[in-house]
Image (cartoon, rainbow, N blue to C red):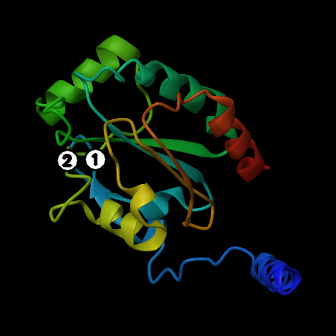
Amino acid sequence: MFKKYCLIGYTILIMISLFGKVEAKYDKLFFDLSIKSINGEVLNLNTYKNKIILLVNVASKCGFTKQYSGLQSLYDKYYDNGLVILGIPSNQFGGQEPGTNKEIKEFCETNFNITFPMTDKVDVKGVNAHEIYSWAKKNFGTSAVPKWNFHKILINKNGKIEDTFGSFTEPMSKKITSKLEKLLD
């Protein structure tokens, strides 16, 4: 009897492994969306077609704020290969991004020499989440919903979510750079 159940279990395991990863059925791609830039202009994300995008919800008064340096280093290292980092300020976690867009921009440029694109301050979770984050949740599930500031979502050249990384994952970590290098080849 035990052998019969083992055989059934192994058969099911083999069948599941043959199916592979099921891909989400995207009705929209990342490049079909838009958001306002930190300067207030509409930023059509189709501008970044055929690029790898790292979306990061950012905050100026967070314990992870030092990650701005790592994000800028990552951007500098891989920009010529097709990486775009998109910083998206949000005040949803501990009220750690209370400033205006102008104050946020000035803080980033003065303290971290940020040159990657930044957007308007938006909600990244809940019923008022910006369309980008609603789209991410719909197509990739709850791992795409930020749990705190400096959550990262990696978008591939096809405009689909490749992976997500929590706040504790440093921008220059091997986990992120090895994934980027595979996508940028």
Residue 15: image location, x then y, percent: 80, 84
Q: Residue at x 55, y 66 (%)?
A: 159
Which image quadrant is residue 161 in?
bottom right
Amino acid residing under circle 1: Ser
Q: Nearer the viewer, residue 67 or 93?
A: 93
Query: Decide: marks 2, 1 in contact (CB < 8 A)?
Result: yes
User: Is 92 left or right of 53, judged from the image as shown?
Assistant: left
User: Is 58 left or right of 98, judged from the image as shown?
Assistant: right
Real-space Cα separation, disc 2 to disc 1, in angstroms: 5 Å
The residue pinned by badge 2 equals 40
Q: Residue at x 49, y 28 (%)?
A: 71
Q: Nearer the viewer, residue 63 or 12?
A: 12
User: Is 122 left or right of 138, judged from the image as shown?
Assistant: left
Q: Nearer the viewer, residue 148 or 72?
A: 148
Residue 8: image location, x then y, percent: 81, 86
What secondary structure is marked by label 1? loop
Query: In this picture, is 158 found above or below 22?
Result: above
The residue pinned by badge 1 equals 37
Q: Residues within 10 Å of mark 1 (few under 14, many from 20)?
A: some
Residue 76: image location, x then y, percent: 59, 27
Q: Residues within 10 Å of mark 2 (few under 14, many from 20)?
A: few
Please tell me the numbered disc located at residue 71.
none
Q: Residue at x 66, y 37 (%)?
A: 175
